[in-house]
Image (cartoon, coloured by chain):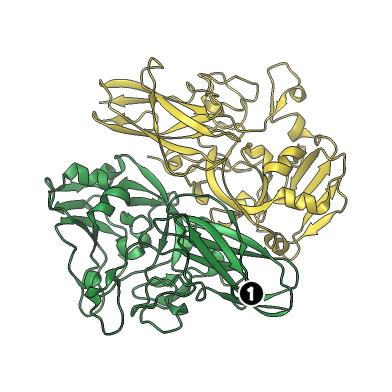
Chain colours: A green, B yellow
Amino acid sequence: MTTSMRIMTDNPLNAETPAARLRSWITPNAVFFDRNQGQIPDAPADLDTWRLTIDGDVNQSLKLDLDRIQSLPKAIVANTLECSGNSRSLLEKRAPGNPWTIGGVGNAVWGGIWLRDLLNKSGLADRAAHVAFEGMDTPLGKSRIKFVRSIPIEKAMSSTLLAYEMNGDPLPLKHGYPLRALALGWTGANCVKWLNRITVLERPFKGFFMDQVYRVFQKGQMPASGEVVTAIRLNSIITRPLAGERLKKGDVVVLGAAYAGEGRVAQVDVSTDHGASWQPAEFIGPDEPYAWRQWQYVWRPDRGGDHTLWSRAVDDQGGQQPMSATWNFLGYGNNGVDEHAVRVVVT
Amino acid sequence: MTTSMRIMTDNPLNAETPAARLRSWITPNAVFFDRNQGQIPDAPADLDTWRLTIDGDVNQSLKLDLDRIQSLPKAIVANTLECSGNSRSLLEKRAPGNPWTIGGVGNAVWGGIWLRDLLNKSGLADRAAHVAFEGMDTPLGKSRIKFVRSIPIEKAMSSTLLAYEMNGDPLPLKHGYPLRALALGWTGANCVKWLNRITVLERPFKGFFMDQVYRVFQKGQMPASGEVVTAIRLNSIITRPLAGERLKKGDVVVLGAAYAGEGRVAQVDVSTDHGASWQPAEFIGPDEPYAWRQWQYVWRPDRGGDHTLWSRAVDDQGGQQPMSATWNFLGYGNNGVDEHAVRVVVT
């Protein structure tokens, strides 16, 4: 059983959590997935000089140090974060980008302040429509484009955290110390790390990371014509047994997780006969908005040989995880039941 | 602001979490309080030879290795653990034992198996009334008495976990690797670490740690005549500002936690005028059975100088934290509002 991170690229660091470490509700900081566009800062920001700037279409620009931020009303929120491209490598048809299996996801309890409290302090101009986040990481690649992303003002005002704490520890350097944006229930691309500037805009930020990537589009289409990747899609994963595992006859406790972005997971069903029948799984562990549910299902294989395990999540609006993901050119949002199947051998 | 552990004794290790590290819902494993009677094992148990034995008044004794334990249905539970003697040093009248302030408490998300699943597997004899836990730590002190504790069969069958995971990580060595008992909502004394033997008994285990300590009794009374320390009492703590902190005029965000053992915290009120008036605090963070609630209250001091902050928790049965704890000879269960007051200076 592999329990160390699977590194996909070194510079920038992109690494996923092994499935066995996704079996608990809390994903420890040390094994939380790494997704970077730029180079992680070499050293933690110097808090004597670090400031968060709020500017743009506001009545009053602000500059705050970390002490000031931590002196504001605190929010503590469980939130499951997923990379936009998570599970991309499980698609039948190849898509470019990091070859994530299921480990570009994790759940943490974050502490910070509500972005709306800051925006209310600065005062929004009437034309304010989007909020752009900029971080301190150094851009990589030839074009040296900063990773700037913006989210709609409605999301910024309703459910976006500026987090300085992760699972009770100060935000680790590689997860954005001292501060990161967390658009709750949205993919990691919307959650800029090493945040030091928040700019209120009258339209979405224009740039490579808004218009060329993190868009759902088909081959031959203009990327910018595609929908922006925002909320995490309803999905379920099997974390035990592991793919290819050889199992002895007898009861097998199947473990997994299910998540729904801004929604709530209401049910998870398991099929061991390619969908001919589905059995309900049992939820285990905390039940919190924005956070995944862990589940288990006791399976008694009726024969030796190859078996395929499927899990399928249903949300509280009756939405159902699709049997197969809708393919798109960059392979975002793969939440297909079939792509997340686990094949095992009973001996 | 001190953020390192406050070590009270070295051998055995007894150390409390600094108040500033109790501000989040999750208490990280690295700063979770340490309470030991014996010597922490030098090295993790060898899993090739480690076994959990279940014996005594059962139909069938069992010996299980960790793989077998981890192959059983999993439970994931948030549980706030508190030392029986936590806050002892805040009592007005001195009591012997480690001088805990408020840091003998912490909250973790634990993974393991339900003890009832094992006991059902072994089959309980009709006379089964108590369940004793024995660990692998080496006794210290002249008398070399093992730390053995038993709990009633009703608690063992309803809400006792055998935990192998703490905040998503394998149980750390100093917190009982590979396995510890967790009588949910009960004090640490009922949650034996380095567990390797569970013995079902027809009466409570007899011994020093059952009859001489972890009993609520008054001076001159026989310890064994006192009630056994079991469930954690309703309590609230203030984690910010810290005692003695000097605050500037203006809004002060007061942070704290409240917990109720097997109960649920329903409300926390704050008084800054010695109880003449009480204002409701706001809950922040996850709301789970057995786990504490984080709360905050925005306070605007009306004058400079000395101030005393009080917090008072109410449970969902209307039970209220007492203004002052009921003193007992060993200083257990101090949950007094006044003892947990924080005095600060506004400049």
| Image coordinates for residue B226, horizontal then vertical, percent | 73, 23
Chain letter of mark 1 equals: A
Residue A65 or B251: which is nearer the viewer? B251
Tag 1, which secondary structure? loop
Return the x and y of residue A180 as percentages of the image width and height: 31, 56
Residue at point 72% right, 16% down? B220
Quadrant of image for the N terminus of chain A: bottom right
Q: Amino acid at mark 1?
A: Asp
Compared with A291, A117 (above or below) is: above
Side of A304 relative to B76 (left or right): right
Number of numbered callouts drawn: 1
Label 1 packing within 10 angstroms: few (<14), some (14-19), many (20+): few
Taking the image as shown, residue A112 lies to the left or right of residue B294, namely left
Quadrant in which the C terminus of chain A is drawn: bottom right
Q: A65 left or right of B92?
A: left
Q: Is residue A42 visible?
A: no
Is residue B317 or residue B173 the one in the foreground? B317
Residue B158 drawn at (x, y percent): 70, 42
> Which residue is rendered at x = 27% and y = 44% of the image?
A69
Horizontal side, residue A228 vs residue A296: left or right? left
B27 over A265 or under it: above or below: above
Query: Percent position (x, y) of residue B34?
Result: 58, 43
Q: Is residue B308 above or below residue A103?
A: above
Q: Residue at x 44, y 68 (%)?
A: A104
Which quadrant holds residue B38?
Answer: top right
Which residue is more in the foreground, B278 or A185? Answer: A185
Residue B10 visible at all: yes
Q: Residue at x 83, y 50 (%)?
A: B123
Residue linked to disc 1: A273
